[in-house]
């Protein structure tokens, strides 16, 4: 009974129904595209991480933040080697 009423309402407003299904289709396409891009980006990041070697990692601390959103950094102590070396 409820299903029949829903179908009748869908058939009475074909333009709204078409736009609704078009919206669902676009959302599905964007969701699958986003997932694909996420998987590809993770794969590329892993390949880049395996390809390059970190030589040194500086120890830095933030000393202040300006009102414009800019940060000021200073090196704290010695520069330590990366975990690979």
Image (cartoon, rainbow, N blue to C red):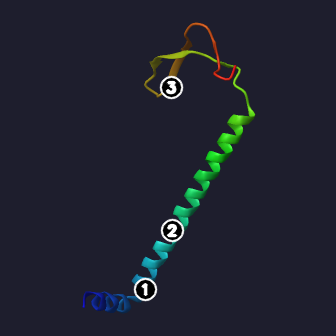
Comparing 61 with 85, the one in front is 85
Quarter of the picture containing the N terminus is bottom left
Of the two numbered discs 3 and 1 on the same chain, state the one appearing first in sequence. Answer: 1
Q: Residue furthest left?
A: 1
Q: Position of residue 60 (x, y in %)?
A: 55, 16
User: Crowding near pointer 2: few (<14 within 10 Å), some, many (20+)?
Assistant: few
- Please report the residue visible at 57 percent of the width from the left and 15 percent of the height from the top: 59
Q: Residue furthest right?
A: 51
Residue bearing mark 3:
70
Q: Is residue 42 left or right of residue 18?
A: right
Tell me the SS state at disc 2: helix
Residue bearing mark 1:
15
- Please report the residue visible at 34 percent of the width from the left and 90 percent of the height from the top: 7
Q: Residue furthest top?
A: 77
In the rendering, which numbered label is found on residue 23? Answer: none
Q: Position of residue 30 (x, y in %)?
A: 54, 63
Quarter of the picture containing the C terminus is top right
Relative to 26, say whether 83 is above or below. above
Of the two numbered discs 2 and 1 on the same chain, state the one appearing first in sequence. Answer: 1
């Amino acid at each position: 009974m409820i299903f029949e009423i829903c179908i009748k309402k869908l058939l009475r407003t074909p333009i709204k129904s078409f736009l609704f299904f078009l919206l669902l289709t676009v959302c599905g396409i964007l969701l699958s595209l986003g997932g694909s891009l996420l998987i590809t980006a993770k794969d590329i990041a892993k390949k880049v991480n395996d390809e390059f070697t970190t030589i040194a990692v500086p120890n830095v601390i933030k000393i202040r933040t300006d009102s414009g959103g800019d940060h000021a950094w200073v090196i704290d102590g010695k520069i330590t080697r990366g975990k690979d070396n």
